[in-house]
Image (tube, grey):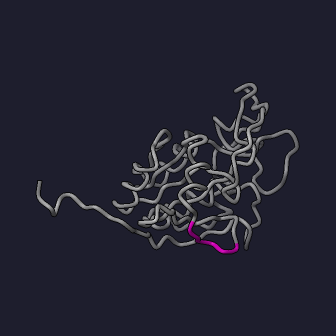
Amino acid sequence: MSSTVVKSYSSKTLKVPFVSQLSPVNAPFGCEGASLLMALKYKGYSKVGLRTFLDDMPKDKGGNPYKGFAGGNPYANQNGVFQSIFPKPLTTYGKEYSSKVANVSGYSTTQIKKEIDKGNPVVAYVTLDFKKPVWAKWKMGSAGTKNIVDNMHVVTVIGYNSNGSYYVADPNSKKEKYWVSKTNFERAYNALQWGVVVR
């Protein structure tokens, strides 16, 4: 094998443009959309603002996040609804902007790093503030009752380093981009191993 073909990175970060879910658009439940939009903007696939992006996102008024954004409103709390959009419908939506959006749920963290090496940001389903996953049962419309990570949050993974830490763009954080320890990131990500890549 030629050494020009095999690349081994100990550290890599991507200069992904930041999109906040808090300001100027206040979308407390818009983390999935904001994270995907960051990745699409980085690749040059989208120039739309967050409100347009969230408004156009597939919705499921019946509360099934496996079909679209559950409840249909990322801007306000809806009691009894698990307000999220899961990887499959999020990927389908992303494909409206580029065919190079793929559902990579089941990917190991090693595979995520390989995507980063290739310059591809990964939208990852983790936990809010990378706390320990808390599981709970939720009614999800036509999908029935499901056991899910109750403190789920979604960020864009945009780098890693030789310490094993991961660099993330967090749409819910005033810090915008920050490093997360290997232990905290992998504990949060491995709870579901859900992700969407933009290549």
Quadrant housing residue 184: bottom right
> Residue 30 lies in magenta, yes or no?
no
Taking the spot 28% from the left edge, 61% from the top edge, the residue there is 8
Taking the spot 47% from the left edge, 61% from the top edge, the residue there is 164
Taking the spot 85% from the left edge, 46% from the top edge, the residue there is 78
Comparing 6 with 104, the one in front is 6
* Residue positioned most to the right: 79
Comparing 165 with 174, the one in front is 165
Quadrant housing residue 7: bottom left
Does 148 sit left or right of 187 as displayed? right
Comparing 198 with 193, the one in front is 193
Q: Position of residue 9 (x, y in %)?
A: 32, 64
> Which quarter of the rendered picture does the C terminus lie within?
bottom left
Residue stretch in magenta: 174-179
Q: Residue 107, relative to residue 12: is it above or below?
A: above
Q: Position of residue 197 (x, y in %)?
A: 46, 51
Q: Residue 172, relative to residue 122: is it above or below?
A: below
Q: Position of residue 189 (x, y in %)?
A: 57, 48
Quadrant housing residue 162: bottom left
Q: Position of residue 19 (x, y in %)?
A: 61, 69
Task: Say how many tags the image has.
Answer: 0
Does 146 sit left or right of 10 as displayed? right
